[in-house]
Amino acid sequence: MIHNDTTQIQRMLSQLAHPKPYDKGTDMLWTDPYISEQLLACHLDETSNLASRRADLRAAVIHFLQQYLSPGDSILDLGCGPGLYTHKLAELGYQVTGVDFSERSIAWAKDRARERGLVIDYQCSNYLNFASQSRFDLVMMIYCDFGALVEEERALLIERLRMLVKPGGFFIFDALTLQSIESMQFTTSWDLSEGGFYSPLPYLCLNQRLHFPSQKVLFNQHYIVEEQGSEHLYRFWNHYFELEDVQSLFLPRSFTSVTKGTHVLDGLDAYNDEHVGFFVVQR
């Protein structure tokens, strides 16, 4: 039974009302034992784009990436999840490394690679802390992960990329653009579940999506109250970029060029895919 006492309501209001840019939540999806299992199922669900893009859209991304690759090149996939891109790239003959901090996803990726006889170096690590003696022809970060980083994290990642990308090599990532968010709705809603994505127990989920134009960032928060009264707050920030924004991030830091690919994808799924920008940063 949810405990609707005044103290709990006041606490909820103080946490949910008027969030400031980059306020953090109290919990993390990817390392939660139960939710990470649900996330893996979402990654592998070819009928939706909630965690990973469908196979046809992944093929379009790989086709785009191959414009910047030569046979046998080395590739580093940051935030590789269960290896949906890395498996295919290894099958195409590239030398592939995948990094993700979801133990469940990495375990699945390793098992699938073993089943297919693929040699892929998988590492369970936070890519912001990832270090390697190797340099790569291509470092990729797909499904708008770069936009989820706050300013300090982006700066840290860019410094690491300077060491990870070979001279002349590429860092390629996709991100929301202003055009991709123009039709999005910024609303507050709630759901009552008998057990689902966030918990096997009955729970109430309060959802909110906001837009902070001055920071060029979207905000999503999900406040979960389980039947026995436990509370969890998940918060996600996602920046959108134009070409000049990305140029200002990379060109002063020893990268030589930044270009933008458009219409790599089609459709209006989770991120209005047809307007997602693919940014190509050359070292």
Image (cartoon, rainbow, N blue to C red):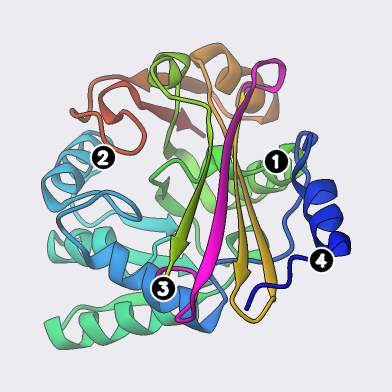
Comes first in the chain, label 4 or label 3: 4
Q: Secondary structure at mark 4?
A: loop
- The percent position of residue 187, horizontal first and vertical second, equals 53, 30
The answer for how far apart the CA atoms under marks 3 and 1 are is: 34 Å
- Horizontally, residue 1 falls left or right of residue 81, namely right
Please name the amino acid that badge 2 sits on. Answer: Leu
* Residue occupied by mark 4: 5
Residue drawn at point x = 28 percent, y = 36 percent? 68
Please name the amino acid that badge 1 sits on. Answer: Val
- Between disc 2 and disc 4, the foreground one is 4
The stretch of residues the image draws in magenta is 195-216
Mark 3 crowdedness (10 Å alpha carbons): few <14, some 14-19, many ≥20: few
- Horizontally, residue 222 falls left or right of residue 27, namely left
Q: Is residue 84 above or below residue 246?
A: below
* Residue occupied by mark 1: 150
Comes first in the chain, label 2 or label 3: 2
The answer for how far apart the CA atoms under marks 2 and 4 are is: 54 Å
How many numbered tags mark residues here? 4
Q: Secondary structure at mark 2?
A: helix
Q: Quadrant of residue 22?
A: top right
Residue drawn at point x = 42 percent, y = 24 percent? 184
Q: Which mark is residue 65?
A: 2
Comes first in the chain, label 2 or label 4: 4
* CB atoms of marks 2 and 3 within 8 Å: no
